Structure formats: C-alpha cells, structure tokens
Amino acid sequence: MTGSSAAPERSGFAFSDEARHRIFSEYVSYLLKACDVFRVPHKHLEYSERELAMAVEESEIDLRAMLARRSPTRGISQGKIAGVLAFRLSRFKIVHFREDGWANSNFHLVQELAATLLVRKLFVQRGVPEKNILELSYQLSRRHANQETAGLFFDAFVVEPAG
Amino acid sequence: MPNLQDIIDNPEALQASVQRMMNYRGSRCEVSLNHGIRTTEELDQLVRSAPADVVDIKAYQRILGIDAE
C-alpha cells in the first residue's frame, strides 16, 4: 500500500478538523488518567499516532454506515456515536507498553478505559457510574461488544432532548 | 412463492421468478429509535459542547481494589 502525506478528503458524515483535534488531544489526556487509575507509570506507555488517526477514520466509516442503515433523515443517537468511537478506539493497536509495564495486572484495560472515558465526555456528556465504565472497558478488552451494543450501553445514559 | 420442483422442471418459470425479483421495488421503513445527529455540523456542535470533566481516580481504584498511594 502506498500512502500520501496530504490530508485525505472526507466526504459525507464525518468529524470536522476541530472535532478530530479535540478527540486526539483529549484521548491523550484520558490515556494519562487511565494510567493513573491503574498506577501505570506514564513512561511505560507509548501510543501509535497512526493507529489513533486510523481508528477515528474507521469510526467515521462506521457512522456513515449506521446513519444509512438506521435513519438518514432523523440521524443517529449520541450514544451510538459514543459506542462506535469507543469500539474503534479499543480495537486499533494504539497503546503499546514497554516491557517495564507488563507486570501490571490491569494493563490490558488502559486503552479501553481511556476510550470509554473519552466518549463519555464528548458524546454522553453526563455521569456514568465508575463500575459501569469499568465493565464496558472489560467487555471491550476481553469479551464481546460491537459498535451497536456499545452504543446501546451509552444510549442508556444519554438524556434525550424533548420533542 | 414458486415451488422449487416446478422451477427445476420448468426453465420458463425460473426466468419468470427471476424477473419478478428484478422488478421488485420495495423499501423498508427507517429505524425511528434513538435518533439525533444527522450532519457533520451537528456532530461538530456536539463535540464542542462537551462540558468540563473530572475523573475520580480514587473511585475507580476503590472498585478495582487498587491501593491509592
């Protein structure tokens, strides 16, 4: 495969450059928080910029497919958007640990917790109990959840606008 | 619905069946559950409106049984 240094053209339903910038910067801040939760020293972790960018790009493809499948005229819920992005941010090989970090028994949850906290803030925009956040992180990391089932989880916490 | 044996025995029946399917122009209803965000602009506005957030690190650690320093 060949790559181009120019930013790709995006068409249709997509994150704006400003939204992508916020996703990238906030993702890194939540990665730090996830490390703090599990007491993983920050120096033990690296993240792939390429994989992070590709995860967001892949989530846009998912969102366009979901919009077409569900309701192009009425749109898709904030919870479903959160579920799509959480899923993609969990599946791509973003987080890598240096050997020093392998002894931490929770290191497999760092990437998923960062993803879940990020989408909770950006798209759910209200509190979700910590035990539920951890449960979804575990499901994404070690069990089974896809974009729509993760979306179903977040839908339960989003306040629907009246009307 | 065509009977499968009839279709096997009668090539014209198969052709007619295929033609009926080719002419089918049905459409399904949109899913009208959990809707909301329709455009890039609305998505952008949603991301912009995200409020400040505080993560209670100690609350997560308590659930996980991780001793706080």
Image (spheres, rainbow, N blue to C red):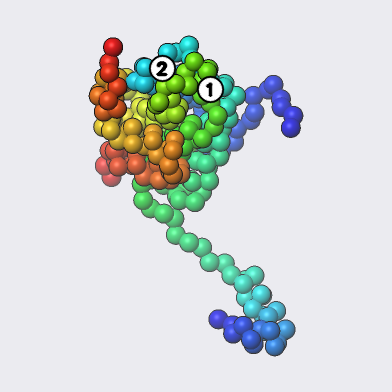
Query: Which residue is identified by label 2?
Result: A40
Q: Type of residue at label 1?
A: His
Name the residue located 74 percent from the left edge and 29 percent from the top edge.
A2
User: Residue at the spot x=43%, y=25% of the render?
Assistant: A107
Name the residue located 52 percent from the left edge and 41 percent from the top edge. Answer: A62
From this view, report whether residue A34 is shown above or below residue A60. above
Residues at marks 2 and 1 on the same chain: yes
Q: Residue at x 34, y 20 (%)?
A: A37
- Spatial separation of the CA atoms under disc 2 and disc 1: 12 Å
Mark earlier in primary sequence (2, 1): 2
Residue B52 coordinates in the image, percent (x, y): 32, 19
Residue indicated by mark 1:
A96
Instruction: Give neighbour class at mark 1: few <14, some 14-19, many 20+ (Cα, 10 Å).
Output: some
Quadrant of the image containing the N terminus of chain A: top right
Q: Position of residue B49 (x, y in %)?
A: 36, 25
Q: Position of residue A111 (x, y in %)?
A: 45, 27
Q: Chain of mark 2?
A: A
Which quarter of the figure has residue A103?
A: top left
Say how many tags the image has. Answer: 2
What chain is tagged by disc 1? A
Asked which secondary structure carries label 1, the reply is strand
Residue B26 shown left or right of residue B57 in the figure: right
Q: Is residue A110 above or below residue A149?
A: above
Q: Is residue B43 above or below residue B48?
A: below
Q: Is residue B18 above or below residue A54?
A: below
* Mark 2 residue element: loop
For disc 2, the neighbor class at 10 Å (few under 14, some 14 to 19, many from 20) is many
Q: Position of residue A80 (x, y in %)?
A: 41, 41
